[in-house]
Image (cartoon, rainbow, N blue to C red):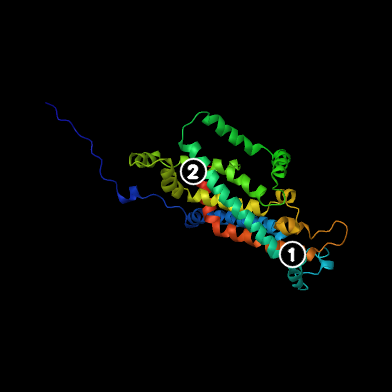
Amino acid sequence: MTNSTIAYDPAPTAEQDAVPAPPEGAANRRSRGPGARGRIRSLLKHLALILTGGVMIYPLLWMLASSLRPNDIIFREPGILLETFESANYTDGWTALSSPFSVYLFNSAVVVLGCIVGNLVSCSMAAYAFARLEFRFKKPAFALMLLTIMLPFHVVIVPQYIMFSQIGWVNTFWPLIVPKLLATDAFFVFLMVQFIRGIPRDMDEAARIDGAGHARIFGQIILPMMVPALATTTIFTFIWTWNDFFSALIYLTDPNMFTVPVALRAFVDATGESSWGSLFAMSIVSLLPVFIAFLVGQKFLVKGIATTGIK
């Protein structure tokens, strides 16, 4: 029987474990270098964003400054610094047309409210049908609905005008509101369909087991969970309808029925002198509701777009 020897390595000493430390200056350069470069890149990005934002907001600031200048120096001053303060543009612009500007604000508010209600009701119901119901020709109907997004509005304006003229709706608000009650805005239908598809069907099945029909499922389960999509629809409808000039110009002929965009066009005289100061002043007034709506609903707008899968 032979004795086997087992090799034994002694424990490493402290001198063997020690790793040569880099020079103090090099370690500090490595620790501070990437951080400093990152801060410089972040600073440059912020400067670029500030410059870009300044370029984009400059026309608005110039319009605000021009609304406080006399007409004879508006286009001679490209800057936004005021040398004179002409607040009379607001008082004159408010009463410059055949009716006070509050009449046009009220007309736009009526049209906007009707369009918002129409889109919320009709588009949400159409979206529920496409997302939850099963019926014949569902996929072709959905594809046809999406194709209408690419259809220019000017293609259908002539037959629509003829139809509304025969009904007797020209020079009324009905041609601007009634189409919204028929889910004609395919973009909002698609947005809500994408949102409803993200809601688990287990909730529908549980409600159906309890005896709920489609009306209760839609009204008590789906609709309360669609708040972000409904808020997004409300904000977009408000902005697009408030700024709609072409449709109101086609259907509204009575000056007392004008909406805000058409009333602003009345300040520009093609044959005589235009009241630019009053025009810019009332433009600022007309922009305030849009800014307020966007600021109030910004959180819902971002959440609604993010949760519907639209990039």
Using the image as rendered, state which of residue 225 and residue 78 is in the foreground: 225
Q: What amino acid is found at the position of numbered circle 2 in the picture?
A: Phe
Residue 44 location, x and y as percent? 62, 55
**Helix, strand or loop at disc 2?**
helix
**Does residue 16 appear anywhere in the picture?**
yes
Q: Mark 2, mark 1: which one is toward the viewer?
A: 1
Within 10 Å of the Cα at label 1, are there few (<14), some (14-19), or many (20+) other Cα atoms?
some
Q: Please give the name of the residue rendered at 69% of the width and 56% of the height, measured from the top-left corner.
A: 56
For label 1, the residue is: 99
Q: Which mark is residue 279?
A: none
Residue 229 location, x and y as percent? 51, 48
Q: Quadrant of the C terminus?
A: top right
Q: Is 9 situated above or below 303?
A: above
For label 2, the residue is: 195
Residue 4 location, x and y as percent? 17, 30
Q: Is 148 situated above or below 299?
A: above
**Does residue 193 appear anywhere in the picture?**
no
Q: Quadrant of the N terminus?
A: top left
Q: Is residue 193 left or right of residue 255?
A: left
